[in-house]
Image (cartoon, rainbow, N blue to C red):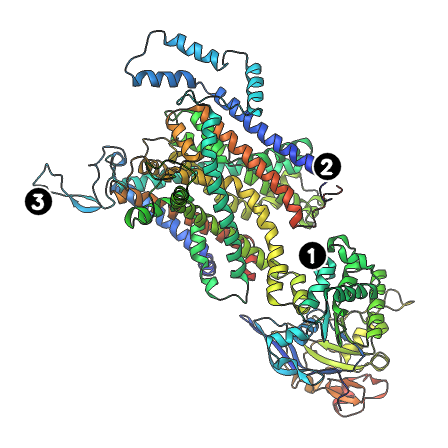
């Protein structure tokens, strides 16, 4: 019996450019349980948004998916026809876009942009029924249904993002992929929009994949968190596990770079720069920035290990089984010997 | 209510300024030169008949009085302006009893008919081609059309017209070589006459469409490339829209807007091009009338034609300004 | 040497620019080598026998012994008024490009000065310039030139005079582009930095703005030259040019006026038509190429 609604299995996404093959996603594997909120974090260029596009099968040439599965319940989306995958979008898996400012068609009224989505999915409903659904969707995101008669330029940034959310929830999808849904908004609006997403998701029972780089926001919103680095999944676990005891050195640095009240002036960044996806270092792609690098790191790509049932990590430090107390190995030589 | 009084008023003032500038230019430029068109014209007539009649100077003087050229400059200007705005464009020197308004009135329907049809065809066809060329799902044949269409767009219409005349009309004898209708045909309202007019306008129309097509195609292709990178296209695809809707309602609909602005800017260029095409074909429109008047030194007709064309362009621009907000809701005319 | 190689390598990627410049080189060679072989008078009426089809050995009927002596070659034929079409092609291309360059350079210079002044001084001056540009751009330039040229009279117009008249209406496009570019560049960080560092107004213009405006000035020059060539040919074709000169526009005027095709003299029309078409295609390709040079973004998205 499956306990997931969406399963991404050993997914590779490669872009074939003149300069070489860009590996935007390497063997990424994770499950999404029904109604669950999963966070997907990583630096810009770590392949988060590519993963979102790959799930909806919207990778454009020169990009391709040479290997992997995207299972929506019992169907592998990668084997569907063009027309079938089009029907999955919005109805089963919907997306809340990243650039809310420009994600709405500037020459169409909001209502028409909700309706055309439904019309193109042949719901077999009357126009009146669909208009009612559209109005309900707007109400669900705390917009006055009269907003439907307005054009995008007449809305504020927060209202636009709400309108986008209304579009993506109108057909009650099983999975909502929110790709940095608040990146263009001010802090107060960010919070309101996140609350709205959380509430409609709970009401509909959909699962959410929240993509972002804001660890603080993640900690408040999601149940489980997946950390990506240079196209690979490096750590996956419940919020309590990952924040309480981060395994991967990269995750440890991400969390310690969060500002803490009362500790002014000590801002810790992560030294080094993200590697180019077309020119990844051999072995673990994080080894040149890792403070705990040792023998195998430069030799082999680490596999996703399961030191605990609900906490996975891809790091050579944990190959011998249970990590040391508090998860942090103080000196790499200790492990090496 | 989309239009505010202020918006309409501002555009209307621009229209008036355009017309006023054209009229003023028409009045002053000839005054700046040492030439006296009437004297020259009469001299030309006189030399044609072989001798300069006695009393030539008196004749010039009487003509000048008749055309009001003896009054002080400001008074001439005032009379001229009031004449212009009331549609009195003066009389033709070469076809004396006929007024300029009459001559232009006879030629104008031909030009408007030809120009309106060809501009619309070139615009729609070019926009369509440009959109299809940029659409990844379109048949690849469209992408091979590029070089041919672009080369035609670079060459002036009258050069294409001359080439068409040589091959289609002269060598292959498929279509008439020029004119608006056959020699010896009496214009009437019959179907045969309409067909004949149609046959005669095919080649000029083809030349204008071929030369206009390229520009619209390039413009639209460029805009479509830009639009396809927009977030609303990505979101539209993620919404699971059918690809025709994404192409037409999201892509083309937005890429169209700069095309329409471009049409307003290209208007004066299109008119210049068509004047020469008419001349090449001897098509009985404004262009041919202009060339004939230049050969006959018929100055008032030349000035009249330029004035009428500028007014026509001004009015077209005004109408387009009024239509544009219907296409682009972002342009707000209620306030501002 | 390495710089030369770099340019060649760039041209390989930028096909339109390469072909456009190729045609330009061809024209330069054609006119310069051609002018060594062609006598100036041959391009004027009665400079050659009339209505000779293209031939390598032409013998006038009155001279039966010419084949043994030296037959004349008219590889492009001669027109109905006795011009050698080869001479017309050589001189006409040069005359046409001269008018175009003269008017284009004047237009771009005037446009640059007015654009800078308009952007820097603002106020009433800016408003005035903007209105003039807007109004003049809506009026068909060719027709305004018709009024001016017909008032001046065809007798007095020389090739240079023609260029000057056309330059009167070649400055609006450059003014508009330069003005908007200067306005946007003025706000960019590097100009702000220069100003904060105490660089003077003219210093900023010469060292910071002009280098960044170069691609736009180049594109503007090509556009102005194209417009000027179009206008000069249009005026000449309407009969408002120097009708004795062997310019391409004037030749087209005579082709239309003398019914060259109906008289079967196809080469009379073919020579100016092909040359004119080639000139416009060349200008178009160069402008597309320069566009790619100035906005690499366009290139990448193709």
Q: Please tell me in which quadrant of the rendered image residue B194 appears.
A: top left
Q: Position of residue C276 (x, y in %)?
A: 37, 44
Q: Position of residue B49 (x, y in %)?
A: 29, 16
Q: Which mark is residue A108?
A: 1
Confirm or deny contact between disc 1 and disc 3 (CB under 8 A).
no
Q: Which residue is mark 2?
A: B5
Q: Position of residue C288 (x, y in %)?
A: 49, 52
- Under circle 1, the secondary element is loop
Circle 2 chain = B
- Under circle 3, the secondary element is loop
Q: Is residue A182 above or below residue C235?
A: below
Confirm or deny contact between disc 3 and disc 2 (CB under 8 A).
no
Answer yes or no: is residue C148 visible.
no
Q: Which residue is mark 3?
A: C68
The reply, left or right, for residue C209 in relation to residue C12 is right
Q: Position of residue A188 (x, y in %)?
A: 86, 61
What residue do we see at 9% from left, 38% from top? C63
Disc 1: CA contacts within 10 A as few (<14), some (14-19) or many (>=20):
some
Say which of B57 and C205 sits in front.
B57
Q: Please tell me in which quadrant of the rendered image residue B47 appears.
A: top left
| Residue at mark 1 to residue at mark 2: CA–CA distance | 25 Å
Q: Which mark is residue C260?
A: none
- Under circle 2, the secondary element is helix
Which part of the image, by quadrant, shows the N terminus of chain B?
A: top right
The reply, left or right, for residue A325 in relation to residue B44 is right
Q: Are marks 1 and 2 on the same chain?
A: no
């Amino acid at each position: 019996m499956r306990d997931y609604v969406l399963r991404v299995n050993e997914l590779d996404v490669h872009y074939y450019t003149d300069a070489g093959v860009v590996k935007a996603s390497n063997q990424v594997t994770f499950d999404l349980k029904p109604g669950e909120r999963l966070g997907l974090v990583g630096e810009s260029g770590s392949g988060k948004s590519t993963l979102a596009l790959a799930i909806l099968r919207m990778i454009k040439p020169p990009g391709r998916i040479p290997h992997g599965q995207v299972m929506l319940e019992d169907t592998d989306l990668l084997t569907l026809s063009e027309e079938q995958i089009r029907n999955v979008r919005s109805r089963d898996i919907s997306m809340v876009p990243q650039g809310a400012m420009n994600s709405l068609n500037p020459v169409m009224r909001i209502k028409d942009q909700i309706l055309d989505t439904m019309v193109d999915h042949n719901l077999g409903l009357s126009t009146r029924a669909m208009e009612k659904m559209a109005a309900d969707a707007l109400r669900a995101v705390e917009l006055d249904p009269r907003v439907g008669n307005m054009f995008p330029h007449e809305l504020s940034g927060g209202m636009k993002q709400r309108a986008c959310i209304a579009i993506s929830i109108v057909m009650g999808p099983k999975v909502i992929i929110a790709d940095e849904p608040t990146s263009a908004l001010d802090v107060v609006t960010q919070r309101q929009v996140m609350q709205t997403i959380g509430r409609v998701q709970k009401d509909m029972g959909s699962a959410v994949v929240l993509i972002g780089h804001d660890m603080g926001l993640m900690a408040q919103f999601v149940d489980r968190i997946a950390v990506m680095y240079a196209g690979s999944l490096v750590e996956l676990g419940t919020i309590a596990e990952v924040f309480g005891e981060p395994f991967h050195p990269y995750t440890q640095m991400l969390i310690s770079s969060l500002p803490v009240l009362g500790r002014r002036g000590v801002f810790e960044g992560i030294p080094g720069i993200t590697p180019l996806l077309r020119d990844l270092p051999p072995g673990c792609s994080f080894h040149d920035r890792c403070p705990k690098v040792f023998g195998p790191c430069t030799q082999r790509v680490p596999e996703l290990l399961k030191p605990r049932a609900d906490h996975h990590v891809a790091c050579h430090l944990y190959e011998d089984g249970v990590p040391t107390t508090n998860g942090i190995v103080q000196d790499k030589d200790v492990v090496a010997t | 209510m989309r239009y505010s009084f202020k918006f309409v008023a501002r555009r209307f003032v621009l229209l008036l300024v355009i017309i006023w500038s054209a009229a003023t230019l028409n009045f002053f430029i000839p005054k700046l030169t040492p030439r006296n068109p009437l004297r020259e014209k009469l001299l030309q007539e006189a030399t044609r008949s072989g001798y300069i009649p006695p009393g030539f100077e008196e004749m010039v003087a009487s003509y000048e009085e008749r055309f009001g050229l003896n009054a002080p400059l400001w008074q001439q200007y005032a009379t001229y302006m009031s004449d212009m705005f009331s549609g009195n464009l003066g009389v033709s020197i070469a076809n004396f009893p006929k007024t300029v308004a009459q001559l232009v009135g006879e030629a104008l329907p031909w030009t408007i008919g030809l120009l309106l049809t060809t501009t619309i065809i070139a615009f729609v066809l070019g926009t369509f081609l440009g959109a299809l060329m940029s659409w990844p799902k379109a048949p690849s044949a469209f992408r091979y059309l590029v070089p041919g269409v672009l080369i035609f767009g670079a060459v002036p219409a009258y050069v294409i017209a001359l080439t068409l005349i040589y091959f289609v009309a002269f060598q292959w004898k498929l279509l008439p070589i020029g004119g608006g209708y056959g020699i010896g045909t009496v214009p009437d309202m019959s179907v045969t006459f309409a067909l004949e007019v149609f046959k005669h306008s095919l080649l000029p129309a083809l030349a204008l469409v071929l030369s206009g097509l390229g520009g619209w195609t390039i413009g639209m292709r460029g805009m479509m490339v830009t639009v396809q990178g927009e977030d609303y296209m990505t979101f539209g695809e993620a919404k699971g829209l059918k690809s025709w809707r994404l192409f037409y309602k999201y892509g083309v609909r937005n890429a169209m807007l700069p095309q329409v602005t471009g049409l307003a800017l290209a208007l004066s260029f299109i008119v210049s091009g068509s004047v020469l095409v008419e001349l090449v074909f001897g098509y009985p429109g404004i262009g041919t009338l202009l060339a004939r008047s230049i050969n006959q030194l018929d100055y008032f007709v030349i000035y009249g034609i330029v004035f009428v064309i500028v007014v026509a362009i001004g009015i077209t621009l005004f109408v387009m300004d009024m239509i544009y907000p219907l296409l682009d809701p972002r342009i707000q005319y209620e306030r501002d | 040497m390495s710089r030369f190689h770099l340019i060649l390598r760039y041209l390989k990627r930028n096909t339109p620019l390469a072909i456009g410049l190729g045609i330009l080189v061809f024209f330069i060679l054609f006119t310069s080598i051609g002018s060594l072989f062609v006598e100036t008078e041959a391009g004027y009426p009665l400079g050659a026998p009339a209505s000779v089809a293209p031939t390598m050995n032409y013998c006038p009927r009155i001279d039966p012994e010419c084949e043994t002596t030296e037959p004349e070659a008219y590889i492009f034929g001669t027109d109905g008024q006795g011009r050698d079409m080869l001479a017309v092609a050589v001189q006409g291309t040069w005359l046409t490009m001269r008018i175009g360059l003269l008017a284009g350079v004047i237009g771009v210079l005037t446009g640059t000065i007015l654009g800078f002044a308009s952007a820097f001084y603002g106020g009433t001056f800016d408003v005035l310039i903007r209105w003039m540009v807007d109004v003049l751009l809506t009026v068909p330039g060719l027709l305004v030139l018709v009024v001016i040229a017909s008032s001046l009279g065809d007798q007095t117009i020389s090739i240079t005079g023609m260029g000057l008249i056309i330059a009167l209406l070649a400055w609006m496009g450059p003014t508009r582009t330069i003005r908007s570019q200067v306005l946007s560049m003025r706000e960019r960080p590097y100009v702000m930095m220069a100003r904060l560092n105490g660089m003077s107004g003219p210093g900023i213009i010469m060292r910071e703005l002009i280098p960044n405006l170069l691609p736009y000035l180049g594109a503007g020059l090509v556009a102005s030259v194209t417009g000027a060539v179009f206008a000069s040919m249009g005026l000449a074709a309407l009969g408002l040019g120097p009708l004795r000169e062997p310019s391409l526009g004037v030749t087209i005027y005579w082709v239309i006026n003398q019914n060259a095709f109906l008289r079967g003299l196809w080469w009379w029309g073919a020579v100016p038509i092909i040359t004119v078409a080639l000139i416009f295609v060349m200008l178009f390709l160069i402008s597309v190429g320069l566009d790619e040079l100035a906005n690499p973004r366009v290139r990448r998205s193709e």
